[in-house]
Image (spheres, helix red, strand yellow):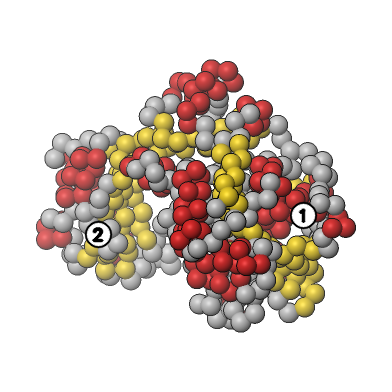
Amino acid sequence: MDDASRRSVTLAGGQGMYGDDVPSVSRLLDERIDYLCLEALAELTVSILAKDRGRDESLGYTKDLGQYLSLALPAVADRGLRVITNAGGVNPVAAGRLAVEVARTQGLSGLKIATVVGDDLTAQIDSLDRELGLINVDDGRRWRDHVDDLVFANAYLGARPIVDALEQGADVVITGRVADPCLFLAPLVHEFGWAWDDYDRLACGIAVGHLSECGGQSTGGNFSGDWWTIEQPWNWAYPIVECDADGSAVLRKAAGVGGRVDFDTVRHQLLYEVHDPAAYLTPDVVADFTSIRLEEVDQDRVRISGATGRTATPTYKALAATALGWAAESRVAVSWPDAHAKAQAIAQVFRKRVAIAGLTVDAWHEEYWGVNALHGSTVPLKDDDDAPEVMLRVAWRCRDRRTAERIGRQMPPIGLSGPAWGVNGTGKGMIGSASQHLELWPILIDKGHVDAGVRVQVETV
């Protein structure tokens, strides 16, 4: 479409993570939005979904996708709402089948469900390495020298295949790993006909996406300013953005919800997870957020404009994960007096007993919640042991699951034979079950080697 065909488009960010609050989508649907964008993935989430797929090849997408679609599809059928989500995870084809099943269960017909595939590089990562010589961008290690037991490998795609799906008339677009803000950029490119070299407008779209991708974080959630003044923090607010063809937009929230939208809450999210605000790297454009202007135009309404951009890099980021043994942990609550000192003694006794038992540990990790778990030594106690209670968390990694789980059994006897601490486990308790540990490999791959395998599949219900 050209710019004259649509004066504005209204997007809503209805999900910020796997496990977000599904019923809150209903508030957004009441606002007559044009697009509902559901951002479900993080590195941890992809790891969880890959493990799901490893247990059952029909899985690998987020298990709450069906709930979101059950709420949204009637609006898709009745008034033309369109849904875009990366909840397909590591199995977007299966997620697409689920969407078709939900539509049929609701008696809906005529809907076009699109799936984007091609981000999954698991089967070809070794051939890509032989051709390109893949390198871990964090530490420079070569893939061929260190890789073992690959679990998954996915490239972060951009907005282009989603735009392709929308141009084919898709009502619902389900992707695998797509860079988060590109879910929101795609409908703007489609509706306004932005060119792929119109970098300033693309950057504005990325800014809209970044402000919308994290659920309620731009509308008062997770706020580090005067957080105690946020109204009704239990009544979730999610971002709604009214976008114009020139790239400017107004961010607001639904009527009757809590939260707040102002200069501070928006700028708080604007800098969230941004390494360099002057060069925010995405697959479609490098955005400069330092040029953005934020203006409070009314209560709970902030105008966003002025982002600039330049050509994207020639590579996609890809993330591979390899198996790295099995991890487990033990958590115990230690009471005053001398809580920190006793917790340290318990950890020492525990590790000594593990060694006596002849159990091999590849890596140890200790945290003292209430002392140094979140901030390390940057927030010192008033004296050597000022904490009224301390939570000791000891974690370990072993080569096999059985050993990892046996180690935790060395903790309970300390309750009667070690320092006086109350024998109080919490969370996973004193004997935690083991889970597979993964090592993440961030890699850069030439776009041409990925794009050749990207496909859009559209099915009409």
Q: Position of residue 47 (x, y in %)?
A: 43, 44
Q: Position of residue 15 (x, y in %)?
A: 55, 61
- Residue 158 is drawn in which quadrant? top right
Q: Is residue 122 left or right of residue 199?
A: left
Q: Residue at x 85, y 52 (%)?
A: 2
Q: Residue at x 16, y 49 (%)?
A: 410
Q: Is residue 151 left or right of residue 417?
A: right
Q: Is residue 318 left or right of residue 8?
A: left
Q: Nearer the viewer, mark 2 or mark 1?
A: 1
Q: Residue at x 49, y 22 (%)?
A: 126
Q: Position of residue 348 (x, y in %)?
A: 24, 49
**Number of callouts in the render?**
2
Closer to us: 146 or 179: 179
- Would you name the residue on which mark 1 appears? 191
Q: Position of residue 180 (x, y in %)?
A: 61, 50
Q: Residue at x 51, y 59 (%)?
A: 103
Residue type beneath disc 1: Glu
Closer to us: 402 or 204: 204
- Would you name the residue on which mark 2 appears? 429
Please, what secondary structure does the residue beneath circle 1 have?
helix
Image height of 297 relative to 372, above or below: below
* Label 2: how many Cα within 10 Å (few below 14, some 14–19, many 20+): some
- Residue 330 is drawn in which quadrant? bottom left
Residue type beneath disc 2: Gly
Q: Is residue 21 left or right of residue 339?
A: right
Closer to us: 298 or 3: 3
